[in-house]
Amino acid sequence: MAVVGPSRGGARGSMSVMQGAGQAVVTGAQSYYHPPPPSQDLQPDRPIGYGAFGVVWAVTDPRDGRRVALKKLPNVFQSLVSSKRVFRELKMLCFFKHENVLSAQDILQPPHLDFFQEIYVITELLQSDLHKIIVSPQHLSSDHIKVFLYQILRGLKYLHSARILHRDIKPGNLLVNSNCVLKICDFGLARVEEPDKTKLMTQEVVTQYYRAPEILMGARHYSAAVDVWSVGCIFGELLGRRILFQAQSPVLQLELITDLLGTPSLEDMRHACEGARTHMLRHRTKPPALSALYTLSSLATHEAVHLLCQMLVFDPDKRITVVDALAHPYLDEGRLRYHSCMCKCCYTTTNAMRQYTVDFEPVTQHTFDDLWEKKLTSIQQVKEEMHKFITEQLNSSRVPLCINPQSAAFKSFAR
């Protein structure tokens, strides 16, 4: 039974959903949508994940019967910081236009401004995520790893070209379809890169196991290199089928990192805070042990370890960039496989010839604008601007959707 139901307003072209005969019944405005499949084909609505600032459910779009993901962002206007963060994520989801980055397909019609407290966004539904695949008994070949890593870096190149730092790249935030197409998701912690290196950036980002050493060591400012470190940790996890640096505290996390990379030089720790440098120098000097990466699995070839070592570099300024990582020969087969049969940017002609795109890893034409954030100085301002933004995003050619409180699953979803 659908948690998502069409708009209840009396506007022309609206639909209504009623509970009846054990299923959600769609009535009205038949010319605006394709009827959903018969009730026996409908799958129940269910929770599929929890992001940094919301919950995600798999639901059925009543307009065409397609299964989609519905992300609920609750209690949006509790503080100015959190409301601006949610608005930023919403704007990003509407901004993104890339095969390997999740974007908004629709936004549910908001209520009157006085009752506006929650936001519901519809995105594409993917079957799994990389964490579930890594911990499963499913076999991962070298080709799997290469095509997954290629898509992660391809999506990140697009994000970084828009000046966006994801700041929470981890296997659970990498959605995967049954045909191995991968999309980066969950932008609750994402922000625009800060060009002013004197400005303080929050350190409460990135799940600990994938947190770059500069953040662990209290750097006041950091760059897109933090995302590259996270990808390196995921690359190692794909090779070894276990978390590369798994510690119970940030201090122990740093210990595991230096066990592999060795004690960094003072030059490599120049971004760290004074206390972290003092702590590091107080311990005995450790030599690098990068040869241990070859023991991750038989898939840890020379090419794989060479690329991994360039990602797992202590000094962020010496860490490989996403653009240079994509040029590494290890990813040549992943690029070929992706564009031979998986992407939407290339196509096969009627005479069975593959027509390849001129740009395998496209960037955005415009950077993401965050100047609006400085203009919003109160929760009420954010609320009004967000309500206006959502209303402008609604597609007038499609029937608007809203929550159906008559659904059997509604109470669970509301909780």
Image (spheres, rainbow, N blue to C red):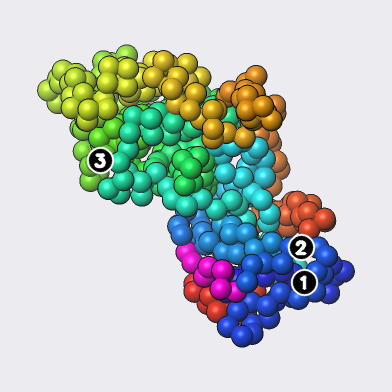
Name of the residue lying farthest toward the front? 351
Question: Crowding near pointer 1: few (<14 within 10 Å), some, many (20+)?
Answer: many
The residue positioned 51% from the left and 19% from the top of the image is 323
Q: Say whether disc 3 or disc 2 marks the residue closer to the N-terminus.
A: 2
Coordinates of residue 137 in the picture (x, y in percent): 27, 48
Read off the magenta span.
39-47
What residue does disc 3 label?
Answer: 242
Q: On the image, which quarter does residue 218 sit in? A: top left
Q: CA distance from mark 3 to mark 1?
A: 49 Å
Q: CA distance from mark 3 to mark 2?
A: 46 Å
Point out which mark residue 333 bears. none
Q: Is residue 251 left or right of residue 95?
A: left
Q: Is residue 332 left or right of residue 79?
A: left
Pointer 3 local density, CA inside 10 Å: few below 14, some 14–19, many at least 20:
some
Up the image or down, 33 lies above or below 218; here it is: below
- Give whichever of discs 2 and 1 has the lower sequence position: 1
Residue position for label 2: 33
Q: Which circle marks residue 15 in the picture? A: 1
Q: Secondary structure at mark 3?
A: loop
Tag 3 near tag 2, CB within 8 Å: no
Under mark 2, the amino acid is: Tyr
Q: Is residue 84 visible?
A: no
- Identify which residue is drawn at 68% across, 77% down: 25
Q: Residue furthest left?
A: 284
Residue occupying image coordinates x 41% and y 15%: 329
Q: Position of residue 129 (x, y in %)?
A: 42, 47
Residue 29 shown in magenta: no
Label 3 amino acid? Arg
Which of discs 3 and 2 lies nearer the camera? The answer is: 2
